[in-house]
Amino acid sequence: MSTHFDFIWRFIESPIWRANRTQNKHFDILDTIKTHYKLILYLIVVMVAFNFLSHGSEDLYPTFLREQKHFDAKTIGNITIFYNIAAIFGGIFFGSLSEKIGRKKSILLACVLVIPATYFWAYGNSLIALSIGACIMQFMVQGAWGVIPTYLNERVPSHTRSTLPGLVYQLGNLIASVNALIQTKTAEAMGNNYAGVMSVMIVIVAIVLLVLIPFGKETRGASLH
């Protein structure tokens, strides 16, 4: 037990934290919000759109497959497994790509490709078409998300990096939490037309991101010190 605590006690803080030790001691979240409110508001809006994109394409997709396509639970489970695997590879691919072409270009490319993927994801006329469409969709959606952790950390001042990225993400997620309710109520009112509701939502959000992202700064290569 003592060896375990001795190890924790001797653990060295990161060079970045040590370099910003003075600022860390005087960090005040309210002062930070007041000073950087324009950046914070921009990032919150971006996170709202991103959360609508991810949750809008994921949360009710199994419901769509059950209620509108009438697939059984096993088939829905298999499709869900496949598109989540595709999502992992999408995050890795676009995250790596952002090191070559930049954060903004990678996000924009993924969002552009989300739009044509929507057709196969929502209107595929067979199990195979829908499965491929779902995999392509999540590859692109989570591909765009794969850039976000680095992008957020590179956008905020270094001494706020342990606070602001999480704050803007959680506030964006909170606002976008109405997504499932909006989609469900609208789809039910349209005779369980989940395909129509979800596809319209995704295309609109993708376009919103295509408008928003160019207003942000490119951060590839930014120093984290």
Image (cartoon, grey):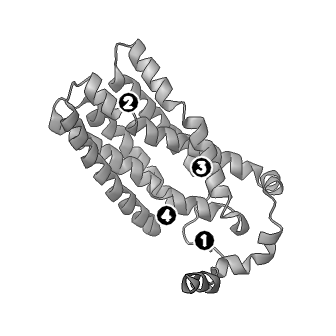
Q: Looking at the rendered structure, which numbered label has been put on residue 102?
A: 4
Q: Quadrant of residue 174?
A: top right
The secondary element bearing badge 2 is classed as helix
Q: Where does the image place residue 79, in percent across and percent down from the top left? A: 23, 41
Q: Amino acid under label 1?
A: Ala
Distance between mark 3 and mark 2 Cα atoms: 24 Å
Disc 3 target residue:
169
Q: Residues within 10 Å of mark 2 (few under 14, many from 20)?
A: many
Q: Looking at the rendered structure, which numbered label has been put on residue 199?
A: 2
The secondary element bearing badge 3 is classed as helix
Disc 1 target residue:
222
Labels 4 and 2: the sequence-earlier one: 4
Distance between mark 3 and mark 4 Cα atoms: 21 Å
The answer to whether the residues at label 4 and label 2 have Cβ atoms under 8 Å apart is no
Question: What residue is at 54 percent from the left and 30 percent from the top?
Answer: 178
Distance between mark 1 and mark 3 Cα atoms: 20 Å
**From where the camera sits, is residue 47 visible?**
yes
Q: Nearer the viewer, mark 3 or mark 2?
A: 3
Labels 3 and 2: the sequence-earlier one: 3
Q: Does residue 70 lie above or below 49 as drawn?
A: above
Labels 4 and 1: the sequence-earlier one: 4
Labels 1 and 2: the sequence-earlier one: 2
Q: Where does the image place residue 112, in percent across and percent down from the top left? A: 41, 45
